[in-house]
Amino acid sequence: MSEDEKRRKQEKPSLSVEKAAEIIKEIFGVHVDVQGSKAFDSYDDANFYVKEEKKDKGGREFVCKFHNGVESGNKDYIESQNAMMIHLAKDGFIVPYPQKSEQDQLYGMTILGTAKKPVKHAVRLLSFVDGCLLCDSKINPTILKKAGEYLGNLESSLDKFKDGKGLIRTHLWDLKNFEQVLSPQFVAPLKQEKDGKKLKLLMKSIELFRARVLPKAEKKLLRMGLVHGDFNDANIVLDQKQEQVYGVIDFGDSTHTWKVNDPSIAIAYIAVTLVKADSKDIVGFGTDMYKNIYSAMLCFMRGFHAKYQLQTDEMSVLLTLAACRIATSATMGWYSFSLDPTNAYLKYHAEPGWKALEIVLNIIDTDQEKFLEDLNITSKTPE
């Protein structure tokens, strides 16, 4: 799996907006307004906001995704992800909707790279979900509770989807595979840190995972199913008034795994968001970061649990898995930054994770039982 992760970095598509426009026209027959289109920041794929060129300025809006070389070679994965989004759309959710190519397919293929090392890339054109991202909005208890409710409803819909064989895969970002972050190339940058603090935080997360999560998984106490896999503030779309959760985007980490992973991932990124947010963008909370993260995660989980109830064993590992996701994100972000030290985007997203991880681990140590009691759910923590 670590070899796949290396390949994702090595075979990430690299192309300009102009080149993307040429390929989109060739595969999907859409004439692109190059000036009105732009590239998005992304980790392993190349994503573009695409504006259709129309004389009356009424062109459609899309997101075009050029997949990295690893996922591009997995036809079942691409087709299952498309089918899942179509299922959710039919179930009333606002999600990116796959567009058909000139060949009446929901994706196409193109070759990038060099003549000596060509790489095949799957290309998908998806409808653009317009709205305001939660990461660009003010964070408050009400919207967090509504986000939790939205994810809870999404989980119920995903449970009804039965055509996801391509989403049964081995994926580093799947929390079942958390221990894979210990691969030598990923931890090497952490070992170079003089104070060793980041590595200690990672290892504490690993210890908790092995002591609290794996024994329950081995006894099959954690339900399996499809998950979104990356329900964070950059993928949650609000309405224009920023009062309701309108839709969700980016299903690239969707997989068949433990159902508890989705809410764990969501509260993990809530913690990271609060650490990196400007104080003026946090409404309804105090000045103590520990209390803010505790309260924010609680708000989200109250909303989630009102729509989709986790079982007691799942709740007992919720915070541990949240810590594991932060540790994965921070470790992989630091690894990516070590490969591209001029990329401020990577460092910006990795650095706050370590502080958030420290706080969540402290919550686990001192307040996990209280957290569960505040949700009216009790759970015995393994000795």
Image (tube, rainbow, N blue to C red):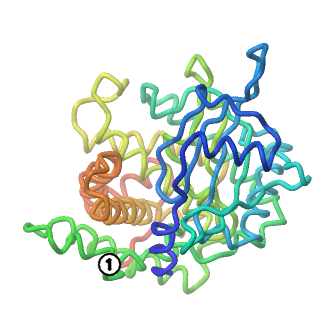
Total numbered badges shown on the rendered structure: 1
Q: In the visual, does 159 lie left or right of 177?
A: right
Locate residue 99: give its quadrant: top right
Q: Residue at x 50, y 59 (%)?
A: 44
Question: Where is residue 186 drawn, in percent x and y?
Answer: 33, 74
Q: Nearer the viewer, residue 291 or 103?
A: 103
Q: Residue at x 71, y 30 (%)?
A: 61
Q: Is residue 122 above or below residue 272?
A: below
User: Is 339 on the left or on the right of 322, as rendered?
Assistant: left
Which quadrant of the view contains residue 336?
bottom left
In the displayed structure, does residue 240 sit left or right of residue 319? right
Write the residue at 79% across / 50% down. 27
Depth check: 238 or 157 in front? 238
* Rendered location of residue 334, percent (x, y): 29, 61
| Residue closest to the eye, 143 or 228 | 228
Place of residue 18 in the rendered image (x, y in percent of width and height, measured from the top left): 60, 40
Residue 134, relative to residue 300: is it above or below? above
Q: Identify residue type, mark 1.
A: Gln
Give the SS element for disc 1: helix
For residue 277, above or below residue 199: above
According to the picture, the residue beneath numbered tag 1 turns out to be: 185
Q: Residues within 10 Å of mark 1 (few under 14, many from 20)?
A: few
Question: Looking at this rendering, what residue extends furthest in the top direction?
Answer: 56
Q: Residue furthest front?
A: 115
The quadrant the C terminus occupies is bottom left
Is 262 placed above or below 92 here?
below
The structure residue drawn at horizontal position 52% and vertical position 30%, both measured from the top left corner, is 143
Q: Position of residue 28 (x, y in %)?
A: 81, 45
Question: Going by the image, does 74 lie left or right of 382?
Answer: right
Furthest toward the left, the residue is 194
Closer to us: 266 or 68: 68
